[in-house]
Image: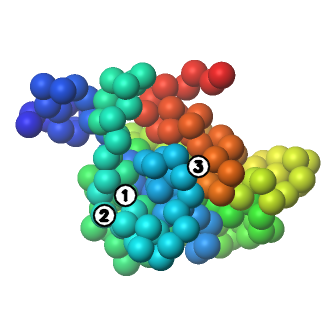
Amino acid sequence: LEKNAMGGASSSAGKEIRAVFIGMPGAGAKSLVGRALTGECPTTPAELEASREWRSVRRAFEQLELHLLGLGSQTGLWAKHLPGAQVLVFVIDASQDIDADRLSAAFGSAIKDCGLAEGVPVVVLLNKMDLVETSVGEERKGLASAALGATCGPVRQCRVCSVSALSGDGVDEAVRVICGNTLTF
């Protein structure tokens, strides 16, 4: 394997992207990894636990191998894995009120204290959007965006997506964004 322009491994098969899913407690980072890899929401503890290992899926449309790791809110593991991330995926529970201070502290720790390289794109996923009314979800999305934007600053490329690990809504679009493809259908 050789290093590609993004610092990741390239092989004769093409480009690879490593995305690390972290987030707020109970937000569903590991469930989203399972959904992205298998098309189904994990239903057993063993299936959720499997997301804590690097797992891969071939993305034919993007012509790349996508490697996903779900660490969730296990902050003790963030510093070990974030330095090697090519995309940071930060997951928030949209079914709960947004605590901007707590959210900013967790996000700030991830991007400033855990070795995340400069310029690594950030994809923020508001999970469990199927559990709230549209207007409430959009309000929470705005609050989360403002809190994270103030923490992140204008330097990083950041995109916020609404998803549901349970129903699958928005997950395919979010994976396309993680892969660097911003096309929406």
- Residue placed furthest toward the left: 1
Q: Amino acid at mark 3?
A: Val
Pointer 2 or 3: first along the chain? 2
Q: Which mark is residue 53?
A: 2
* Amino acid identity at mark 1: Leu
Is disc 2 in contact with disc 1, using a CB cutoff of under 8 Å? yes
Instruction: Give the mark nearest the N terminus, 2 or 1.
Output: 2
For disc 1, the marked residue is 69
Whether residue 80 is situated above or below residue 15 in the rendered picture: below
Residue 57, by quadrant, is top left
The quadrant of the image that shows the N terminus is top left
In front: label 2 or label 3:
2
Is label 2 in contact with label 3 (beta carbons under 8 Å)?
A: no
Question: Label 2 to label 1, Cα distance in Å?
Answer: 6 Å
Residue 168 point in image, percent of width and height:
64, 47
Residue 95 placement: quadrant = bottom right
The residue lying at 80 percent from left, 68 percent from top is 97
Q: Which residue is mark 3?
A: 124
